[in-house]
Image: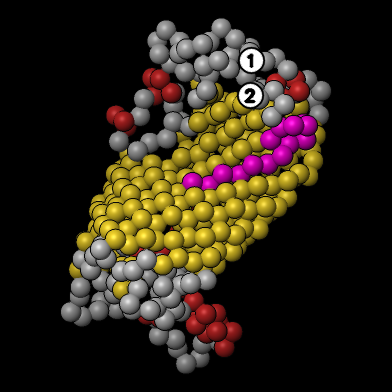
Amino acid sequence: MRKLLTLLLGCLCLYLSALGQAQDIPLPQNTPHSLAKVIRWFQTDNDSNYIEDHTKDIIFRVFGSRKYNYYNIVDRKRNQEVLYRPNTPFNVGFGVNYKFLGINFAFNLPFINKEDKYGKTKGLDLQSHFYTRKLVIDFYGQLYNGYYISNSKGLLNGLNTFTPDNKVPVRPDIHNLTLGLGVQYIFNDRKFSYRAAYLQNDYQKKSAGSFLIGAELFGVRMKADSSIIPGKLAKEDFFNNQRFDRTGIISLAASAGYAYTFVYKRHFFFTVSLTGSIGTNYTSLSLIRKDNKIGKFGLQLNNTERISMGYNSKRYFAGIQYMNFTTRSNSPVPDTYQRIGAGELRISVARRFKLKKQLF
């Protein structure tokens, strides 16, 4: 399954990148009218007073990044929650972009991960974010095995601090599968560019923003060898005393939001984007004691935050990029919900090189 997800993501990446650079690809005379119409729709005539296009430059970058995932079980009535986190690695790498092609190589720095304290997480994170001129497309393909309880202090009976060897409670038996797709349309694509902040192949010279509208589709599965809700909780009636070893969530939501880039002295920038979503979900729980499954449709609430800041110019880029996505899905148990999220923190430094002759 991992190979299939990787292949699908690679194909999707190339396809979306090509669409995002459609103005650089000459259309054959026999191109079907419907396809040509779609490709032309992706083209944008940027306002040169705001956006400077550098897709025909070769862009080299070095970066450090951490992708992550999290899972929370929340009981509103008892004002308590269980927070699960994977022990994800910090990677460093380098990459290159030219027109619609982009390649990144990243390497794990294992000495940064504290496996003796937080346990070991194995996984595959294909989380990717595609920024075309008119669309933002977020793809989530995550497989994680192994979590730890990040709020164990005060949550479990007799555990008010870390264990004597400074370890936190770990759950190597918890497995996660997350598949999702989010699409947002950028209204003011002539003056506002996500690509300037996140891909480095645009340079936004003046402050501008845009309204966003879109939709999100998600499927999540969490499973374990025993109850996902840990034993010896300080509040024994947590989650109405229901214990489950598997949960599945399917959700669909419509989104709307706003993004804005503030530019100071033409080079220093701060980009912030906030999006909220509302929709419906179907959540199922496999109960342990009753050996049956319960399910229910409920309200789905999502939110996405993107923040980027740094320095941008004709030749150089240096910045920090942060993206976080959170889903909130009502469960079949009254006054409870599950929160699942994903995101990435990245630090990038890039240099653009102008070519005297285009490679293709």
Separation of marks 2 and 1 at Cα, in angstroms: 10 Å
Q: Is residue 232 visible?
A: yes
Residue 98 place in picture, x, y as percent: 30, 69
Name the residue type under label 1.
Leu
Q: Main secondary structure of the magenta part?
A: strand
Q: Is residue 92 left or right of residue 121?
A: left
Name the residue type under label 2.
Gln
Q: Is residue 140 magenta?
A: no
Q: Is residue 105 left or right of residue 1?
A: left
Give the labeled residue for mark 2: 80
Give the labeled residue for mark 1: 233
Residue 264 place in picture, x, y as percent: 29, 61
Residue 3 place in picture, x, y as percent: 49, 50
Q: Residue at x 40, y 13 (%)?
A: 166
**Which segment is the magenta one?**
324-337
Residue 5 place in picture, x, y as percent: 52, 52
